[in-house]
Amino acid sequence: MTIAIIGGTGTLGRAVVAVLRSRGPDVRAVSRHSPDYPADLTTGEGLDAALHGCDAVVDASNGPSSGKAAAVLVEGSRRLLEAEARAGVRHHVCVSIIGIDEVPMRYYKVKVAQERVVEQGPVSWTIVRATQFHDLLGMLLATTVRWRVLPAVKALFQPVEVREVAAAVAGVAAGDPRRGRLTVAGPEVHDLRSLGRLWCAATGRRALPVPLPLVGRIGGALGRGALTCAAPDVRGSVTFAEWLRAQQSA
């Protein structure tokens, strides 16, 4: 079995490549900067060569947060699916985010549009939605602490270890093609202030909690826990505190 990982040099893509290679399939890491399988979703250049002979494709690409995200995630998905159809790919696995249809952020609207392209495309698909990675929230907190402050916000998150998401994605990609969805979430729900306390305790850094209100539709959705999932199909086991300890000992 041959599986191509689009975005195979990114945070999740690298983890999916590692999991699949440990399980036996032939794996291709595809990205603009890949030394072996370079390809560009915004132009389609390199896709036919990268996908030739592949049975399944995992799209772990990540668009920029600017207004250009749609060019990668939406138009790029159309080009990718067309190339997959030409190559005879049997299964397309799209990695997405839990709660994107409830939080009216620009990037999330682009992800919703990407999912619709996949659902309407010519290749059997599975959409794997996950909560935020530990890495993302850790980076966010590290950035705010540089200014000696922590946002004391009651926005709810359910962070998950990227390797646990990768294992779930790899299992789907190596399995039988099917049309459906899979959700992956972390073991615990925290608000941002609680996550900040854990981050400071693990790193020994100090910062002043600054209360911030949740306003507007986005704030309301985050406060309701739109980015969390009470009953995911796959629940991770690594807590944010455990991940932090592992980072400090690495």
Image (tube, helix red, strand yellow):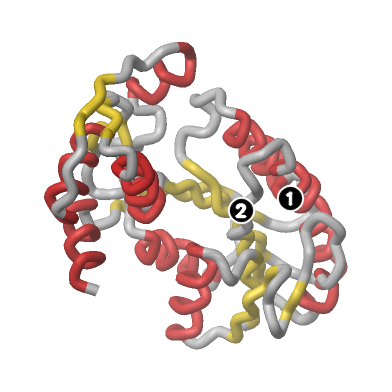
Q: Secondary structure at mark 2?
A: loop
Q: Residue 206 sits in which quadrant?
A: top left
Q: Looking at the image, do the residues carrying marks 2 and 1 touch, with CB atoms under 8 Å apart? A: yes
Residue 94 percent coordinates (x, y): 60, 54
Residue lying farthest front? 147
Q: Residue at x 73, y 69 (%)?
A: 32
Please give left or right for residue 240 compared with residue 213 in the image. Answer: left
Report how far apart the C-alphas of labels 2 and 1 lie in the structure: 8 Å
Q: Is residue 161 above or below residue 146?
A: below
Residue tagged by mark 2? 62
Instruction: Point out the image quarter for the C terminus.
Output: bottom left
Mark 2 is surrounded, within 10 Å at the Cα level, by few (under 14), some (14 to 19) or many (20 or more) other residues, namely: some
Q: Residue at x 46, y 39 (%)?
A: 98
In depth, the one of 43 and 19 nearer the eye is 43
Q: Is residue 233 visible?
A: no
In depth, the one of 10 and 148 nearer the eye is 148
Q: Residue at x 54, y 67 (%)?
A: 13
Image mark for residue 106: none
Please give left or right for residue 241 compared with residue 172 in the image. Answer: left
Image mark for residue 72: 1
